[in-house]
Amino acid sequence: MKSLSEIDTTSKRASRASGFSWGIAEEVGKNIRLLELFGLPGIKNLTQYYLDRKSKKYEDLKIINQKNISNTLAFCPIIAGVSFLDHSKKIENYTKLIFENLAYPILFLPFLSRSSEIMGKKISLSFDENEFLLNLNVNILVNKNDNQILPLAKKLEVKILENEDSFNDEEWKNLYALSEETFVEETDSLKQSGAGAGLTDND
Amino acid sequence: MKIELRNPNVVMKLSRLGSFHQSKLSFLRSFLNEFKDWEYKRDLFDLDDEGFGSAVYSFKKKDRIYSLVCFANKISDDERSDRVIATKWDAAFTLYDGSPAREDIERLKNEVPKQEVGRLSYKELTLSRANKSVRVFDHVVNNLSEGKQPDLDLLSSVGYLYRTTAVYGSGKFGLADRFRIKNREEINGPFRLEMMLVYLVRQFTFDQVNHVAKCKNPTKAVSLDKRICKNLGIGNSTGLGMAPFIVNHPTLLNNWILAREIALKKIREIKQVKSQDSLLFKNSLKKSLVNITSWNTESTYQQKKIKDLLKDVQKVIKFTENDFNFNEEYPFNKIYLWLEQNSCEECTEYVVSIMMEPFDDIIKPLIHQMSSDEDRYFNIPTSRKVNELKNILEDKYSEVLNIDFDKKENNQKFWFISKNKEEPRLADRYIEQGSELEQPLAIARDIKRLYERIKSLNKDVSIAEFLINNSDLRHVVRRAFIIEKFPYSEIQDNTISEKIIPIDMLRLKLSFFGALKFDPRSDKWLRICMFQGAPLPTDLKNYDDQWVYNLDQ
């Protein structure tokens, strides 16, 4: 089994060899490491993408808008990803972004995962039958993982999710009420001695 | 009195970094301190009469076990090479996480001796190999088998029975990634498991030499005297592979140097020094002379450094013994200021190391701050402005920005990875081919390029906007925002200069390992000695913490 350190270093060097700057190659190294750590097919997709780049041209998406459409060449997922990552603070004001014709969307995904951490917001990503929920770069939820090479997303939708609870108030109240059973009812004596400070905060 | 930390523009110069010496902060010393109360055991020793076969050594505490698995092989003299590119070695080793089963040892027997072309697993933590110093090993075997102890002068001139080359860890060749084990308390310090491997290999070399001597002459042979063993270390040959490491791990480098600088600052700030502490300092300094006088090298470059060091350390001893009163306030600050005026860089850093000896209360907390979670600082803060970046460059790289890279001599060298050996190399870009594949290690040059490109930009341009069309400098933009928080993260020197002495970069790292007796074999590789004078594993419980200064004459 390859270690994550080997995956990082080899992906970085291969990225440089494929024409990216060292700085971007460093980003890709970290990203592929992240994908493989989460059990997603990073190496497979990267290898195939770099093979394709030898004979195909891709468009560099350097400015991210709400709608990003390429009618001719497919977008390079790495430049699109770097742009997304670098402009995270601007993008977090959008609720939904569309990318049409994005090559190898799996390679775009870790940039979004890292953006999720920078924004402090979850991001959902969907294309074709695939759905991903990126949780602040801590984990990635996937509706299916066929360990496949996915060469193109004709339409890819990104949603920046507002920070909202996944439960309702009633559910929270019920749980909180249960947690209160660990509390001790304070007697007058405890009120005086338990806190270790005075009875007023005005002293 | 408040003492400022030393200026990175002074400390992070290559000549200064190349003058660093081991200290109480060094990893092999902190390793011994951490593992001194672990249970040491030789679990397996299955060598034939010539000393070839397998052995296992372990350290155990509660449920945690680390096992060194050793394979000693027969190789011919013409196959023996210290170079990292060799394919066969006298012995190969791996540190196994736990206690290896028979099947593990069989699996490792097929992989470990192959080193770079073998495959390890997440159960193995570190990997290395070593060659005999044949001259010394054979001499010791012959003498022991005749019932005699070996010639101490010969042993002293070499210092070890075996010499390792690379010691690998952190995911190399399939070994466990650092993240798998990083939360273990006992390895909360850099390179702990690499140090453990080397330390246990040292013991294997003693056991092997005793075994071969005994097999050679069962009736007459004696064992190598324990006192002699203690005075032997384990050698190491190190090449350029270490140099990129310190450039590629900026926050880790910072944390090593910062620990040293904080230690020095706190020691200089001590108003009254207790007499036992000043005595320990003075004794360590005097005893350390043996380390200098027994430091052998054929390198004229190093010979001059040793000669200057010896002369200056003798001056320091004379000064502290005769002309200095430790009852004065802030005595170590006064000594430090005297050193800056009266001694060479090599001596200043040597004495700074020895100043740490009495002060466990200062040093021990710092040891736990010498690791780094580098991923935390990887993202570039792209919403910040180029004006902020410009200020960082002017503040943190002021001397680097003065280098004229249009001059050929300042742009002479380039770093690359050799295709056939997959090892870092340094070459002259005006003579050799391949500079288009240069590794991103010319940080000073690229920082200067970055500065030239941003200095006339509108100050409100964001870093994200700047990077859209300046991707080629992304790697140094990242570094600039790292150095903003980590002042010692960068070598403040030109790593592609005609004048660069690459072994300065190696020595910096090796000093933090705790190496002694740097012996440059060229400007690109050197030999060192580790654990010379260190307690044997059976004597770890109550060892002398100043062992490094207590070598026998």
Image: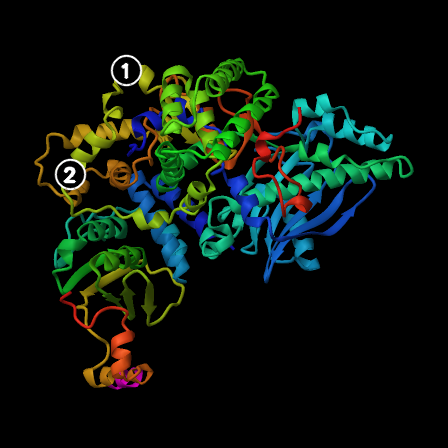
Determine whether label 2 and label 1 are within 8 Å by CB. Answer: no
Q: Determine the chain carrying the residue at label 2.
A: B
Q: Which residues are magenta?
A: A174-179
Work out how far the residue at label 2 is from the one at label 1, CA to CA, in angstroms.
29 Å
Does residue B319 lie above or below A146 as drawn? above
- Which residue appears at 49% of the width and 56% of the height? B184
Q: Residue B80's x, y, as percent?
A: 67, 30
User: Could you tell whether A5 is left or right of B489 in the image?
Assistant: right
Front-most of A50 and B189? B189
Q: Residue at x 7, y 36 (%)?
A: B458
Q: Is B360 drawn above or below residue A196 in the view shown?
A: above
Asked if the magenta segment contains residue B14, the reply would be no
- Tell me the quadrant of the picture where the C terminus of chain B can be found: top right
Front position in the image: A34 or B540: B540
Mark 2 and mark 1 on one chain: yes
Magenta highlight: main SS: helix
Front residue of B191 and A37? B191
- Position in image of residue B498 (x %, y %): 38, 17
Which picture quadrant has residue B341? top left
Q: Which residue is mark 1?
A: B407
Tell me if mark 2 has few (under 14), some (14-19) or many (20+) residues whose alpha carbon lies within 10 angstroms of its own.
some
Badge 1 marks a residue whose secondary structure is: loop
Relative vertical location of residue A93 with respect to residue B46 in this rendering, above or below: below
Residue ID for mark 2: B388
How many C-alpha atoms fall within 10 Å of the one at disc 1: few (<14), some, or many (≥20)?
few
Quadrant in the rendering for residue B463: top left
* Tag 2: amino acid: Glu
Look at the image and say whether residue A177 sits in the magenta stretch: yes
